[in-house]
Amino acid sequence: MIGFLMLNYAFLSWIKPCTFIPFLVSPDAASVAGQNYSMVSEFILVGFSNFPQHLLPIFFLLFLLMYLFTLLGNLLIMATVRSQCSLHTPMYLFLCALSISEILYTLTITPRLLTDLLSTCRSITFVACASQMFFSFTFGFTHSFLLTVMGYDRYVAISHPLWYNVLMSTRTCAHLVFWSWAGGSIMGMMVTLIVFHLTFCGSNEIQHFGCHVLSLLKLACGKETSSVTLGVILVCVTALMGCLFLIILSYVFIVAAILRIPSAEGRHKTFSTCVSHLTVVIVHYGFASVIYLKPKGPHSMDSNTLMATTYMVFTPFLSPIIFSLRNKELKNAIKKSFQRKFSPLSS
């Protein structure tokens, strides 16, 4: 974990200088469809550069506070789960894995965004751009896979409570977490290799504050660009919609099991264990659909930039808040930890 964060720190230190690393292409790559293009050797992240300059410090402060709260909130959840023996259950193991993926996702996106808000040099090399795309896809898909696993965990706990300890053993939970991370890494590597196999020529301005795949594909040239774009969209949509379908299917069985509980109090208590997870799923897929499924229209680049922050910055910010406030057991454990820390005599 520490080694990976050091690697991430090194990656973030690469991307600021205005020097560049030439991208290896074939000698004939500059000629596409019978036309000559100047090859792109680095990208410029347009991001918030078109916004009024007096707004940039405000955005910087806002995103910095959200970034710090995201890190502290997820670290607090992980520390609480580790310190409270009552939380050493599969659900909170998955929650810790989810917190790690969110921390690493924000480390991939937000520091670069904060740096560019206060800088006039917004260039990024091919290597740094590919690294950012790989890590953002890896942690983003890992997040989706873990949400799916958490939905399955709630289904087993409610629909098959007597078999829960057998079906969700420590070994099984470890395998589910491992395959979630492995699946995210495979998706990140596959999409990154497909995209950066293309030739980029002409304009080098990415209309985004990060190496966003759709914005980057608009800069590619060649006959295979359209097919690659369609392939990337199909792969991503299929994976995300597959996760969403499995989550919905889990909740169909969960609702059916809850309706069989005779007392209203029992139904309410049982469903309350799912509220935080269900809320995060709605927020995660809701903001993602706003970004990626919005109809084409006369949207300005500035509005698209602001909309992108809702998914890449605001969603990770909301997640620890939702789990801390909507999960009664975790909320009580956090209170108990603070009381033990700051009021040792009374405890």
Image: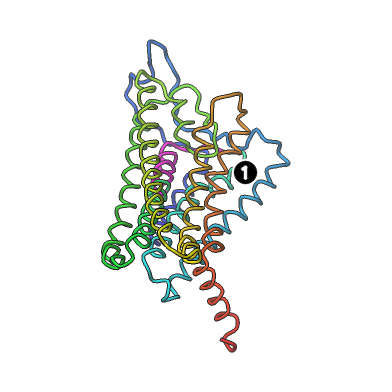
Q: Which residue matches tag 1?
A: 117
Where residue 23 appears, as percent x and y from the top left, is 38, 32
The quadrant in which residue 159 appears is bottom left
Residue nearest the observer in this picture, 318 or 125: 318
Where residue 189 appears, as percent x and y from the top left, is 33, 41
Say if the magenta span includes residue 126.
Answer: yes
Most extreme residue toward the bottom is 345
Rendered position, 296 above or below 167 = above
The quadrant in which residue 347 appears is bottom right
Q: Main secondary structure of the magenta part?
A: helix
Q: Which residues are magenta?
A: 122-139
Horizontal arrangement in the rendering, residue 335 relative to residue 7 (left or right)? right
Q: Looking at the image, what colour scheme do you see?
A: rainbow
Most extreme residue toward the front is 262
Where residue 259 appears, as percent x and y from the top left, is 43, 57
Rendered position, 331 above or below 148 = below
What's the residue at 41%, 76% (across, down)? 85
Amino acid type assigned to the residue bearing label 1 in the image? Leu
Rendered position, 143 above or below 193 = below
